[in-house]
Amino acid sequence: MLSTFRSFFGRDKELTNALRNLIGFTPKNISVYRLALIHRSAGERLADGTLISNERLEFLGDAVLSAVVAKYLFQRYPFENEGFLTETRSKVVSRKNLNGLARKLGLPEMVTKSDENRRTGSSLGGDALEALVGAIFLDRGYQAAEKFILDRMIDNFVDLETLLKEDANFKSRIIEWCQKEKRPFSFTVVNEVMDGHRPSFTIRLLVDGRVVGEGTDRTKKRAEQIAAQVACENLGLSN
């Protein structure tokens, strides 16, 4: 199986150097990182039906990331209630935020994927970031994964104060505006796929029959919020 991984990335030395710059330490088990960088669209299916892709690592990394962020917020905000902590964690680990973090880290360019997954709004980057966290956890343990998340992701690229000030309910804002202006609107599911172990939805927001926003996420609710946020920006309703 390792020989199959090599066909995607070339020599171990090249990948090791790239990963050292990205994660801040030298990987021990390079094969698990190779796997983290194979999107399912470019995965190879073995004779027994097993798909070589980063889906399982994505599942693992999602759990580790959630735990690390929960602990971080619990310690940073000792007097806030559960609702505040839950909402803030959701913003930090949202698909939109993880996609942005992945781009800042240069991760999408390292992922092997098919041409059809180069589309705008793809969650490929965020998925790969979760898979990378899963790979670090398997290779070096929880503390190394925690250090990567805190040092390389949160400290460098996450502005919590800005996240906390964001109005998450863009859908309500756009609906209120459409009703006030008497503009017909609709949220339409244009793509629904089972992306590995979790579904993925792409939703478009139409106002007056024209597409003003589009969003992709793991749930319809969050995809609608992303579409509504894009629409608010396009329509000049973002304050």
Image: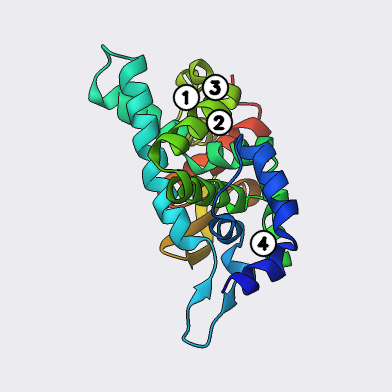
Q: Secondary structure at mark 1?
A: loop
Residue on which disc 2 sits: 153
Can you say which quadrant of the picture contains the C terminus?
top right
Mark 2 burial class by Cα count in 10 Å: few <14, some 14-19, many 20+: some
| Residue 203: image location, x then y, percent | 53, 53
Residue at figure coordinates x 46%, y 49% from the top left: 134
Residue on which disc 4 sits: 117
Q: Secondary structure at mark 2?
A: helix
N-terminal of the pair, mark 4 or mark 2, is: 4
N-terminal of the pair, mark 4 or mark 1, is: 4
Mark 4 burial class by Cα count in 10 Å: few <14, some 14-19, many 20+: some
**Closer to the camera in the image, 196 or 229:** 196
Q: Quadrant of residue 117?
A: bottom right
Q: Which mark is residue 167?
A: 1
Residues tagged 3 and 2 counted as in contact (Cβ below 8 A): yes
Q: Secondary structure at mark 4?
A: helix
Q: Quadrant of residue 97?
A: top right
**Closer to the camera in the image, 235 or 164:** 164
Q: CA distance from mark 1 to mark 3?
A: 22 Å
Residue on which disc 3 sits: 155
Relative to residue 82, is residue 212 drawn left or right?
Answer: right
